[in-house]
């Protein structure tokens, strides 16, 4: 697509529910990244993929968080058993290759109540 | 030391002045450096990249990199009110990901 597309834009969920956040990168972009951004802070790295291979998941806060990119295009970030502290803006970005500048999507605002 | 550090500001400059935004980084960040602009409520937008020591100019923007001092800066000439935003500095590490600073809020007063 023309840009990085994330869905949903907003998600309100009850504590304990699972959520899946979707990212559709720019067509042809090899690398896909997930970040989380708190208000007034810079994006915080979660995980990234080159093609379908997860290269680094060191930023995932705990084992309730997982991500996949099975066909090397669309990616899903899943949070199981959500907690209020998971509330944040989740941002996806893609780049033509590793080391290139990113293009960010519009983000998914997750609120856990 | 944080991997990428920025003064959170706010930095206030009058319209037409030069805005200078600064960033320092640790040894864990070394490969490439980027400046992003983020308007309130919007996503970060890439405005400059710099990979080697020295200056890189693009329109009213100049990025400066000094690897010996582990310092990268962004100068905005002839600042306009539309430049008011948060500017994020990011550095790439050998693992391929970007590490972002907390951002500097810039306010350009008419």
Image (cartoon, rainbow, N blue to C red):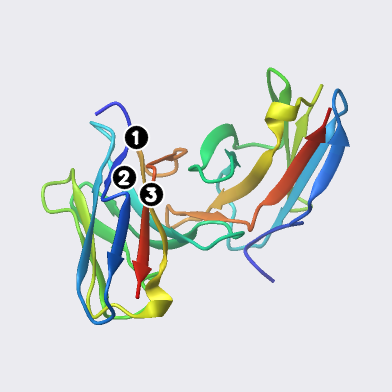
How far apart are labels 3 and 2 at the CA level?
A: 17 Å
Tell which subunit mark 2 falls on: A
**Circle 3 residue:** A107
Crowd rating for badge 2 (residues with CA inside 10 Å; few <14, some 14–19, many 20+):
many
Can you tell which quarter of the image residue A4 is in?
top left
Chain under label 1?
A
Identify residue for label 1. A96
Q: Position of residue B45 (x, y in %)?
A: 52, 36
Q: Position of residue B12 (x, y in %)?
A: 84, 42
Residue most toward the top? B59
Spot occupied by residue B95 in the image (x, y as percentages of width and height): 43, 58
**Residue A70 appears left or right of B66:** left
Q: Residue at x 77, y 47 (%)?
A: B22
Dot in front, 3 or 1:
3
Nearest to the eye among marks 3 and 2: give it: 3
Q: In this picture, is B70 found above or below A105?
A: below
Tell me if I can see residue A92 in this picture.
Answer: yes
């Amino acid at each position: 697509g023309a840009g990085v597309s994330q869905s949903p834009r907003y998600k309100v969920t009850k504590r304990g529910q699972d959520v899946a956040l979707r990212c559709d990168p720019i067509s042809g972009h090899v690398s896909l990244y997930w970040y989380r951004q708190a208000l007034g802070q810079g994006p915080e790295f979660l995980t990234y993929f080159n093609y379908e291979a997860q290269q680094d998941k060191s930023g995932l806060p705990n084992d309730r968080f997982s991500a996949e990119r099975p066909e090397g295009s669309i990616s899903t970030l899943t949070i199981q058993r959500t907690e209020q502290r998971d509330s944040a803006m989740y941002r996806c970005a893609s780049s033509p290759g590793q080391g290139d500048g990113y293009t960010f999507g519009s983000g998914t605002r997750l609120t856990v109540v | 030391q944080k991997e990428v550090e920025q003064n959170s500001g706010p930095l206030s400059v009058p319209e037409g002045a030069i805005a200078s935004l600064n960033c320092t980084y640790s040894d864990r960040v070394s490969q490439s450096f980027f400046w992003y602009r983020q308007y309130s409520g919007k996503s970060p937008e890439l405005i400059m990249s710099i990979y080697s020591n020295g200056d890189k100019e693009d329109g009213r923007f100049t990025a400066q990199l000094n690897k010996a001092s582990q310092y990268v800066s962004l100068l905005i000439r002839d600042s306009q009110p539309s430049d008011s935003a948060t500017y994020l500095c990011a550095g790439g590490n050998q693992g391929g990901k970007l590490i972002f600073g907390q951002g500097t809020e810039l306010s350009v007063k008419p």
